[in-house]
DNA sequence: CTGTTAGCGCCTTCAT
DNA sequence: ATGAAGGCGCTAACAG
């Protein structure tokens, strides 16, 4: 591999001149520049980012840790982050915590050792608050994605979960539903607890009784599925709301297992949803998370932070569209 | 940020000793080791991967360039690669070429400048053969993923596309279909041209006429969709086969636009398919690409290559399961 | 068992 | 307009 020394020798200049033409960091005579450029060409010289980063203590790279690389919503966020990073000349280091705090901690350490300029983090469900305190101490800026932190001392990008759920419930109650089951999942995850809060808002808006609603909370999707199956068999719930794609899978399976049908017997709606779901029956009413745009926005916040380290932290809440489909239509008790 | 010098001073040893306890690269007395370890603790020392990599000329990182980060199949490959890399202590640098040769070239340059130990590449559709020749010259090992190269001079991981399609066509012809349309898409993509070859194999197996089949080739999905719509309106094709998820979207839309219905009027099958598609109607017969495992396998090949630079290149073809569903059932002419 | 030292390739101040 | 030279933080001979 050719180095700056090789280029300098071939061009008959000093390595400092080579560096300066490379970075455009001071004037160099037209003619010398030409010689350097052609020497670069001939030697096939390629800058060594490592040495450069070591010297400048800046890597032009950012890290992204997602909590569930397998979920479509996170895959989209990764896509968005990658695009926005590349547009800014930043390289993306990707890691997946798989909802595990230990793996998350290891990923953070690894990325910080690699001296990333900034970190975008969708925290694992069982991530400890202590982690955030530690991160506060680091000089590497952090942007929280999707999995937000209650006190707004970080830059964060999320969705308007609570309000979106409230709108969804309003839609259901407007159709006459009075008893619904919500599969809330692991409410240690802020986005999920926000959605549950929104559900309660909606129930209150419609002056319905909390006791008539079924709230399914827990970490084990298949257990939730069973509980819902039982509930649908024995009680008169007329609507089911799922709070994420995997929970929607559990919900739909429970509906089938209980011998119910959507939308005939039971209305169904979900957050996040399934891709291309408009092509299939039943069409499912979905609150669509703008995951790709959230990824873009996270990089934006991070870039802003890098250029203004002491500005006030910002929390962005992106709007989620409510896509109405047949799974919540034609309800009649 | 504490450095090895700080640790050494605090522990009252030389930096070389610190380095050796850090890397376990030579024996150090139990007692000194303890002192060093505690000094590391106290200073909050963290290894600087950059300096280390510069010195060792080895970064313990790999690059992955996908051609279409938005497609579910590639998202799964990313997931698999990330997991396998993390399991081996490798950091993943991710880039997306978005099927554009220029972006691909830039991504390659960027990653090589970062001195990745190896590269996993799903080439862009319009990637030039010259690129592969250039890559041959690099000392950085390359593993081709999904988008393979005809001459097997690289390590590669793909699927048994041709044979899988042949099996699928056999299933269709066994049901009595004699006229099918295949949406082959951009056959510059090897996986797609292989699938088309398999289609022709299947047609020949059944002693059907090529002229009775409709082969739709092109880069613009919506144009293919229109052509298929017209064909379905005017000709008696009884089956449609799509060669990727986006092409399946086009195919299903065309079927609807032509006023046909699956499976009543027309059978339908696709490669790659939709996630959780078992939950929806019509259930679609799908050749499922083992994308996650392909990602895992690619890292495996790369790791092997790193430890045995001069071994013969290997091409892995993973088996794709044929999932039969109702979209190809109950056909009667 | 431990220490000294020469770079890895680059940027950047200080001279000229 | 250009060069010389000192590190960035670390590993790996080479010495003791």
Image (cartoon, coloured by chain):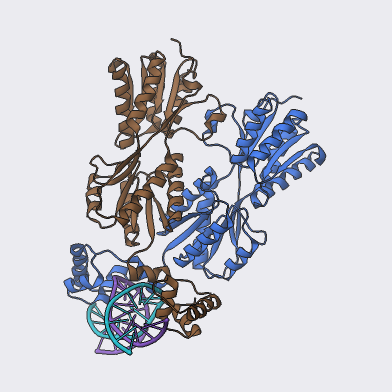
Chain colours: A brown, B blue, C cyan, D purple
Coordinates of residue B121 in the picture (x, y in percent): 55, 57
Report the residue at 46% width, 67% height from top: B113
Between residue A82 and residue A68, name the one nearer to us. Answer: A82
Which part of the image, by quadrant, shows the C terminus of chain A?
top left
Q: Is residue B53 visible?
A: no
Between residue A118 and residue A113, name the one nearer to us. Answer: A118
Q: Is residue A40 visible?
A: yes
Coordinates of residue B254 in the picture (x, y in percent): 66, 32
Coordinates of residue A46 in the picture (x, y in percent): 48, 72
Between residue B61 and residue A250, name the one nearer to us. Answer: B61
Q: Would residue B105 be found to the left or right of residue B19 on screen?
A: right
Compared with residue A31, is residue D9 higher up or lower down, i.e. above or below? above
Coordinates of residue D11 in the picture (x, y in percent): 35, 74
| Residue B21 quadrant | bottom left
Q: Would residue B125 be found to the left or right of residue B91 on screen?
A: right
Compared with residue B197, is residue A30 higher up or lower down, i.e. above or below? below
Report the residue at 37% width, 24% height from top: A167
Report the residue at 63% width, 40% height from top: B247
| Residue A53 quadrant | bottom left
Between residue D8 and residue B29, name the one nearer to us. Answer: D8
């Amino acid at each position: 591999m050719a180095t700056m020394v090789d280029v300098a020798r071939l061009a008959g200049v000093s390595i400092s001149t080579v560096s300066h033409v490379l970075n455009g960091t001071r004037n160099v005579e037209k003619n010398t520049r030409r010689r350097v450029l052609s020497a670069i060409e001939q030697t096939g010289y390629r800058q060594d980012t490592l040495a450069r980063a070591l010297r400048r203590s800046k890597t032009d790279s950012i890290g992204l840790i997602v909590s569930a690389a397998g979920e479509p919503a996170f895959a989209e966020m990764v896509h968005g982050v990658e695009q926005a990073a590349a547009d800014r000349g930043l390289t993306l280091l990707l890691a997946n915590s798989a909802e595990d705090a230990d793996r998350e901690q290891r990923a953070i350490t690894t990325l910080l050792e690699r001296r990333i300029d900034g970190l975008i983090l969708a925290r694992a469900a069982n991530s400890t608050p202590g982690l955030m305190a530690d991160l506060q101490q680091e000089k590497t800026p952090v942007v929280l994605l999707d999995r937000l932190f209650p006190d707004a001392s970080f830059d964060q990008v999320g969705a308007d979960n609570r309000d979106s759920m409230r709108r969804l419930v309003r839609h259901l109650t407007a159709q006459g539903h009075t008893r619904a089951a919500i599969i809330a999942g692991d409410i240690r995850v802020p986005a999920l607890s926000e959605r549950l809060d929104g559900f309660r808002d909606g129930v209150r808006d419609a002056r319905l009784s909390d006791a008539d609603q079924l709230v399914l909370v827990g970490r084990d999707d298949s257990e939730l599925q069973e509980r819902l199956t039982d509930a649908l068999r024995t009680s008169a719930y007329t609507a089911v709301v799922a709070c994420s794609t995997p929970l929607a899978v559990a919900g739909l399976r429970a509906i089938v297992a209980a011998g119910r049908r959507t939308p005939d017997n039971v209305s169904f709606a979900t957050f996040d949803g399934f891709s291309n779901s408009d092509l299939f029956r039943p069409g499912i009413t979905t609150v669509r998370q703008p995951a790709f745009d959230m990824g873009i926005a996270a990089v934006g916040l991070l870039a802003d932070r890098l250029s203004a380290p002491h500005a006030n932290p910002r929390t962005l809440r992106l709007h989620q569209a409510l896509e109405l489909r047949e799974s919540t239509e034609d309800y009649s008790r």
